[in-house]
């Protein structure tokens, strides 16, 4: 058995505490882990090991939460990040389970977020969206469920509308070449691209006639 002789706040890391056992530094702890400890308390080797394991889990969870603060992530993204930081599989699994419990990780919600962002800011075909989400490690059934709600023609129409005015001054042949390349680079099929080139050009003509 070892006795806790001091619990001292870390000067350079607010929210963390140095744990001393029998007068010697043992390990640093997050306040979340240290709150149930007190000076004079005796710890068996098993309890010390549990503290170390819990501290590892807290650090892993906090690392994941920092990533999630920037944008939603897929479970696979969190897994890869924690693995790269050297965390063992049981710790990663525990972390992901906990993040699921508090609704910080949800692949279905992530798919919807990703689609919404792309449709709004960088319209892409369903094929391109599917490939991006596969690269994020999202299971295919979850991806397909999210994509099933999407109208690809509407996305292509929005993509064409975003660029039409930029090339409105060009002759039709040049306009069609630029718009066609733009849409195909975003994964839209030849047939849908051809349809949107013609449709967007007619829209420009209609606007010119009305003005």
Image (cartoon, grey):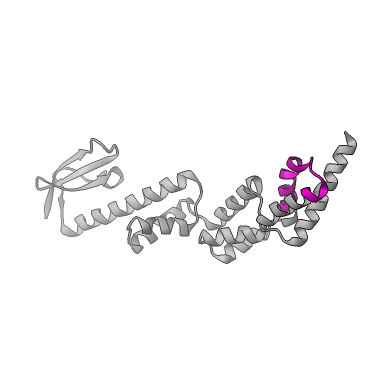
Q: Quadrant of the C terminus?
A: top right
Residue 125 position within the rendered picture, expressed as x and y whole percent measured from the top left: 67, 57
Q: Residue furthest left?
A: 23
Q: Can residue 36 be seen from the camera position used here?
A: no
Q: Please give left or right for residue 114 compared with residue 190 in the image.
A: left
Residue 109 position within the rendered picture, expressed as x and y whole percent measured from the top left: 56, 53
Q: Please give left or right for residue 129 compared with residue 60 in the image.
A: right
Secondary structure mostly seen in magenta is: helix
Q: Which of the 4 quarters of the picture holds residue 147?
A: bottom right
Q: Residue at x 29, y 37 (%)?
A: 14
Q: Residue at x 66, y 55 (%)?
A: 185
Instruction: Report if residue 27 lies within the magenta region.
Output: no
User: 116 or 57, which lies in front?
Assistant: 116
Does residue 187 lie above or below 157 as drawn? below
Residue 17 position within the rendered picture, expressed as x and y whole percent measured from the top left: 23, 42
Q: Residue at x 32, y 50 (%)?
A: 59
Q: Please give left or right for residue 29 compared with residue 107 in the image.
A: left
User: 102 or 109, which lies in front?
Assistant: 109
Residue 167 position within the rendered picture, expressed as x and y whole percent measured from the top left: 75, 43
Q: Can residue 21 be seen from the camera position used here?
A: yes
Q: Residue at x 66, y 54 (%)?
A: 124
Q: Quadrant of the N terminus?
A: bottom left
Magenta part of the chain: 155-175
User: 66 or 170, which lies in front?
Assistant: 170
Instruction: Report if residue 159 lies within the magenta region.
Output: yes
Does residue 142 lie above or below 155 as drawn? below
Q: Please give left or right for residue 111 compared with residue 5 in the image.
A: right
């Amino acid at each position: 058995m070892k006795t806790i002789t001091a619990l001292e706040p870390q000067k350079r890391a607010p929210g963390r505490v140095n744990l001393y056992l029998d007068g010697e530094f043992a390990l640093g702890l997050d306040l979340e882990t240290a709150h149930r400890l007190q000076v004079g308390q005796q710890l068996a080797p098993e309890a010390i090991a549990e503290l170390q394991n819990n501290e590892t889990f807290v650090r892993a969870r906090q690392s994941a939460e920092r990533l999630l603060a920037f944008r939603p992530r897929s479970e696979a993204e969190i897994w890869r990040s924690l693995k790269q930081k050297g965390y063992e599989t049981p710790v990663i699994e525990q972390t992901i389970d906990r993040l699921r419990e508090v609704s910080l990780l949800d692949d279905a919600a992530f798919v919807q977020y990703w689609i919404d962002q792309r449709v709004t800011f960088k319209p892409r075909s369903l094929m391109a969206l599917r490939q991006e989400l596969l690269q994020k490690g999202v299971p295919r059934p979850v991806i397909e469920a999210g994509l099933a709600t999407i109208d690809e023609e509407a996305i292509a129409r929005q993509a064409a509308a975003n660029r039409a005015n930029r090339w409105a001054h060009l002759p039709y042949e040049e306009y069609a070449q630029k718009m066609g390349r733009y849409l195909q680079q975003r994964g839209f099929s030849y047939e849908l691209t051809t349809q949107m080139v013609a449709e967007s050009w007619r829209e420009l003509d209609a606007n010119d006639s009305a003005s």
